[in-house]
Image: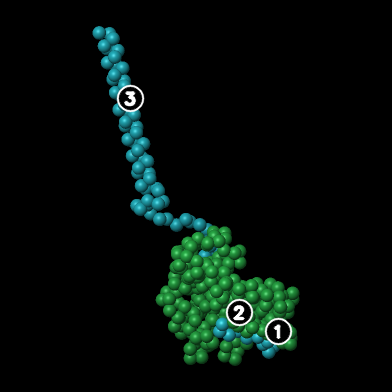
Chain colours: A green, B cyan
Amino acid sequence: MSPAAVHRFRAMGCDVAVAGGNPEEVAAVLERWESAFSLFRPESELSRVNRSRARVLAVSPLFSRALEVALDMAAETDGLVDPTLCGRWREVVLSGSLLSRPQGLPLDLNGVVKSLAVDHASATLDGPGFVSVGGDLAVRGPVDVALPGSDAIRVVAGGLATSGTASRGQHLVDPATGRPSESCWEQVTASGATCLYADVAAKTGFLLGERGPEWLDARGIPGRFVGVGGDVVENDAWRGAARTAAACT
Amino acid sequence: MANNSRIEKARQRARAAKVGLGALTALVFGVAFVGAKTHAPGHAKGKATPLGAPASFERAVKKSVLQGGQIAPPAQPPPVSSATS
C-alpha cells in the first residue's frame, strides 16, 4: 500500500491515520463514538449515565452494545479489563436496553471504546487499507506497522494495539488495587482478530506483568513486550508468526 | 351378638387398614427422604460429580473469545505505527 494514500487528522484525543477509505466517513464514525462515551464531555451518554442516581436506566443501542462487550471482556480477562475499574463489574447487569447497576457506581468504557470505534471505522473502508487511532489499528489487507523500539511487523489481518505507560504515564488501572498498574512492562503490543481483541489482549498482557506472555500464548495471541529497561520479549505466538512469511501474502 | 361380632370384625379390618396405610406412608416418606438426601444435586451432602461431557465439548466451552490476528515479517517501510495509546 502506498504511504501517499494515508490521511491523518485528530479525533478522540489521538492522532488518526486512515488509508483506503473516506477519511470524512471515518471521522464521522469516531465522532459518534466519542460523543457517546467521552468522559470529558458532560453531555455524552456515558457522562449522563454516571451522573444519574437511578439504579435502572434505559440506554441507547450503541451504549448497550459497548457495555455488553466491556462486560464480556471483563469476564474473559477475569476482571483485569473492568468497566467499573474497581472489581464490581459483576454487579452491572444489562438486559436489552436496560442497564442496572448499584446506585452511584460509575462506569468507564475506555477499555473497549476506542478499539470498538476503530473496528467500526474500518468497516467503512471500501478496499484494502487501515484505520489507526492513537496506534490502535484495524487493517483490511496486509499493512506494515512500526513498533515501539524501532522494529516493524506486517499485520496481515485483524488488528494491532499497544498499551502501556510510555506516552500517557500510568493510566492503566489495576482493578485488584484500584491504583495505576505497576507492571514490569513499559509497552505491550498484541495482534488480535479485531482491534478490540488486540487492545484487550495488550492491556491484559500489560497488567499481568511477567505472566503476560504466557497468558497470551495460551490463547494463541501474538504479543510483544517492551520492559521498563527497554528489553524486548516476544511470546511464542509472536516469534512464530514474525519469523514465518505468511502463506497468503 | 351376631351384630356385635360383625361390627367387631369391621373394626378389626379398619384398624388393619389404618396400620397398613400408616406403614405405607412411613415407607414412602422414608424412601423419598433418603433418596432426596443421596441424589439431590443441590443437597449439601450430595457429592458434586463431573458432568462427563465429551472432551471436545469442554474444549469448545473453555475456548477463549479472544482470538489472535495474523502477522508476518514486514516487507515495506511502515506507513503507520502502533504505540502506547
Three-letter amino acid code at the position of disc 1: His
Circle 1 or circle 2, nearest the eye: 2
Q: Is residue B43 left or right of residue A162?
A: left
Numbered circle sitting on residue A60: none
Q: Is residue B37 left or right of residue B83?
A: left
Residue A157 found in image quarter:
bottom right
Q: Residue furthest front?
A: A43
Q: Is residue B65 left or right of residue A126?
A: left
Give the image location of residue A16, x and y in percent.
65, 82
Residue A97 found in image quarter:
bottom right
Q: Which residue is mark 2?
A: A12
Q: Earlier in the sequence, mark 1 or mark 2?
A: 1
Quote the CA–CA distance across marks 3 and 2: 85 Å
Q: Is residue A23 visible?
A: yes
Q: Chain of mark 2?
A: A
Looking at the rendered structure, the secondary structure element under dot 2 is loop
- Quadrant where the image shows the N terminus of chain B: top left
Quote the CA–CA distance across marks 1 and 2: 16 Å
Three-letter amino acid code at the position of disc 2: Met
Give the image location of residue B35, x and y in percent.
38, 44
Front residue of A56/B37: it is A56
Q: Residue furthest left?
A: B1
Q: Chain of mark 3?
A: B
Q: Is residue A140 visible?
A: no
Instruction: Tell me if label 1 and label 2 are in contact, CB under 8 Å.
Output: no
Front residue of A104/B47: it is A104
Q: Which residue is mark 3?
A: B17
Quote the CA–CA distance across marks 3 and 1: 95 Å
Residue at screen point 72% across, 87% down: A3
Numbered circle sitting on residue A7: 1
